[in-house]
Image (spheres, helix red, strand yellow):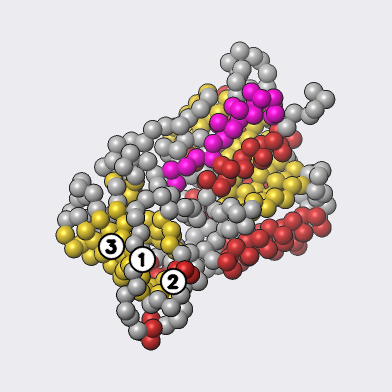
Amino acid sequence: MIPISQIVLGSVMLLNIMTSSENFGSKNIEVFLEVRLPNETPDEKIFIAGSSESIGNWKADGFELSRIDSLTASCRFKISRNEIFEYKITRGSWQTVEKDKNGAEIQNRKFDPRGFAGKDTIEIKVDVASWSDTAKPASHTLTGDIRFHENFQSHILENSRTISVYLPPGYKNSRRRYRVLYMHDGQNIFDAATSFSGVEWGVDEACEQLISEGKIEPIIVVGINNNDKRVDEYTPAESTDPKREGGGKGVAYGKFIIEELKPFIDRIYRTRSSRKNTFIMGSSLGGLISLHLAWTRPDIFGNAGIVSPALWWADSEILQRIKKEPPPKPLPKLWIDMGTEEGNSHDSFKECIEELSTLKSILKEKGWREGRNLKAYLAEGQNHSERAWNSRIEIILEYFFKIPKNN
């Protein structure tokens, strides 16, 4: 899933084009998009991928543009007047998505049609600076001691992925054992060069700073990269939306972490492997699967960071399930949060906030207590993006790993 973020590239010129509202209706607005292409663009099809169902709901080849000449392409399409529209330009796949002039990932482009009431058609002009397969590699932003285990094989999932491991200052020169935080979407947490949005969570920088300042204890952080099966692996139930197929491999993904990855990490690194010293965290669908694992395997995961969770998945299956089932024993320590501007419209902002409130209420009914083993955090003005999660990662780390004042 591509998150909500701020537009960073392209000058957007919005013009009123005389068009009868009878042709397009009051609920939709027509967009004329003109894209100026970089010189190195191959003679291939150009597409727009974006958040509207009318252009494929983030399919990389969602809506094809017409090539006007070698360096220009355009198209017309309709979107809802009531939703913020986000998009990127591709050549048909996420391996050929647009990049900035330095080869780094860009934030989603964004357009809010609500500011153009009374207009039936708007014109957007954007410049593509480069492509992911033609741009020079972006600079890495890794901080501290980070080890990589590439092509880590899973017999359970029948695939492989990269595992990255952050080791705290002093790890090499001590015999100390450390608590471990496992994080989903591992390519997004340490390095802007590998983060799909071009912005990392900054977990490595946050750990280095908080540890050096004595605000948190030294910890190990394990980044679990996703792959093209992300939606399947991060969801405990199959999709109920006919327009969004897949899902339901979350149990197998959890089994991979518990039976294959965690034993490897505990064997290779000096960990404290008990449930109270094992943490799981992720955002969006990663938040959903973190909640599922904390609920179903509290014997392994004694703590869970549930960040901007996709509680809506499969008609809110996770909320319905935990409402009906007895609470896990023992209760894991939880962080749950949501930004106040997550979604594509004001209605979706409200829905996300209500979902967090519902989750909080259910957890309190099941025995969790704020201030003891539950923290519910509403991130004011924050959307659904790595930049937003970066802005609060220090707060989350301090919640779980803060050093008591009497130490």
The first of marks 3 and 1 along the sequence is 1
Proximity of marks 2 and 1: CB atoms separated by less than 8 Å:
yes
Stretch of the chain drawn in magenta: 197-218
Q: Residue shown at 64%/29% (left/top)? A: 210
| Cα gap from disc 3 to disc 2, whole angstroms | 19 Å
Q: Position of residue 93 (x, y in %)?
A: 33, 53
Q: Position of residue 162 (x, y in %)?
A: 46, 36
- Seen in the picture, residue 213 relative to 341 is either above or below; the reply is above
| Cα gap from disc 3 to disc 1, whole angstroms | 11 Å
Label 3 belongs to which residue?
A: 34
Label 2 belongs to which residue?
A: 116
Q: Tag 3: Cα neighbours inside 10 Å, few (<14), some, or many (≥20)?
A: many
Identify residue type, mark 3.
Glu
Check disc 2 and report its element: helix, strand or loop: loop
Closer to us: mark 3 or mark 2? 2
Asked whether residue 214 is drawn in magenta, I would say yes
